[in-house]
Amino acid sequence: MVTHADAAAPAVVVHDLHVRRMRTPVLHGLSVAVPRGRIVGLLGPSGSGKTTLMRSIVGVQVVDSGTIEVLGHPAGSRELRTRVAYVTQQASVYDDLTVRQNIRYFARILGAPASDVDEAIERTELGPYEQRLAGSLSGGQRGRVSLAAALLGRPEVLVLDEPTVGLDPVLRVQLWQLFHELAAAGATLLVSSHVMDEAKRCDRLLLMRDGELLADDTVDGVLAFTGTDDVEAAFLELIARGEPDLQPHGRHVLPESGTEAAP
Ligand SMILES: Nc1ncnc2c1ncn2[C@@H]1O[C@H](COP(=O)(O)OP(=O)(O)OP(=O)(O)O)[C@@H](O)[C@H]1O
């Protein structure tokens, strides 16, 4: 049995999670394990529950039942404050501060070293805008300021909700390169998108629909299982097959070695 101290233990383990939003059930007994040091793509149509799952993992969502452990601690615990970063779809920046002032402010709150500020600005390609007021930036640029703030203190788990929305193709590729660098350095990234095309950039995929997982596998595994050659077709195939053809709990799951899916 793996222990929490084991580097091979999953970064996130969600077990039988039930969440309602405004009394409507959104997640219905969802279980999943997110392996460490990987980029896991959370894909599904709008309203499928991706943000709700991410909010649960970072500990800001009221849940009805189930357990969520992150780096061996209950989601939202004090121990995780600087170890887990969350970037929401709405950029969390101060419009009346410059880009650099925003990042410096968040660095002070986190107790991150000043060198992290330069590095975060550089890694998110914000150098040309660092003296601009955040309020004067485009949506995509503001989103990158949020991402830069999330990199401060080198969190072990990054939960990124649609981080590439509104970015041109060049920046999108650069951001994915950054995600891969972070993962290569040991960080775990859970990245949501409803652009199926981004799936191929992920080490693993979680395909969600109506609050349930349709698949939890590598990209190649999902394609092989469905006999398709792109993730959008695979997604449609999984829906078409319906629950009886899928593996236990109506989903296709291929655990990675050392990253057993939660029971
Ligand atoms: N603040 C809220 N209050 C009530 N219901 C909500 C709230 N936010 C989301 N929901 C509902 O919860 C369900 C799941 O929404 P969620 O935002 O988790 O989906 P999503 O997959 O992230 O969608 P998107 O890709 O559009 O961001 C939807 O039915 C949505 O209407």
Image: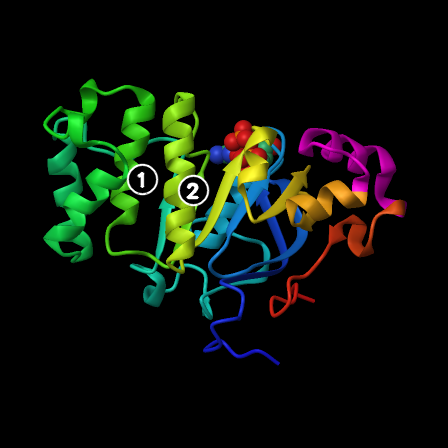
Give the Cα separation between the discs numbered 1 and 2.
Answer: 8 Å
> Looking at the image, what colour scheme do you see?
rainbow
Comes first in the chain, label 1 or label 2: 1
Instruction: Between residue 39 and residue 78, name the one nearer to us.
Output: 39
Dot label at residue 160: 2
Asked whether the viewer can see residue 180, the reply is: yes
> What's drawn in magenta, residue-wise?
226-244
Residue 136 lies, in percent from the top left, at 19, 18
Element carrying mark 1 = helix
Above-or-below relation of 227 to 95: below
Tell me the number on the disc at residue 110: none
Question: For the N terminus, which image quadrant?
Answer: bottom right
Residue 241 appears left or right of 261: right
Q: Position of residue 262 (x, y in %)?
A: 65, 65
- Mark 2: few/some/many CA within 10 Å (<14, 14-19, 20+): many
Per the image, the residue denoted by label 1 is 147
Relative image position of residue 216 (x, y in whole percent) = 67, 50
Q: Quadrant of ligand 1?
A: top right
Between 72 and 201, the residue placed more toward the observer is 201
Which residue sits at x=16%, y=37%? 102
- Magenta portion: prevailing SS class: helix
Q: Are marks 1 and 2 in contact (CB under 8 Å)?
A: yes
Eyeballing the image, is 199 above or below 9?
above
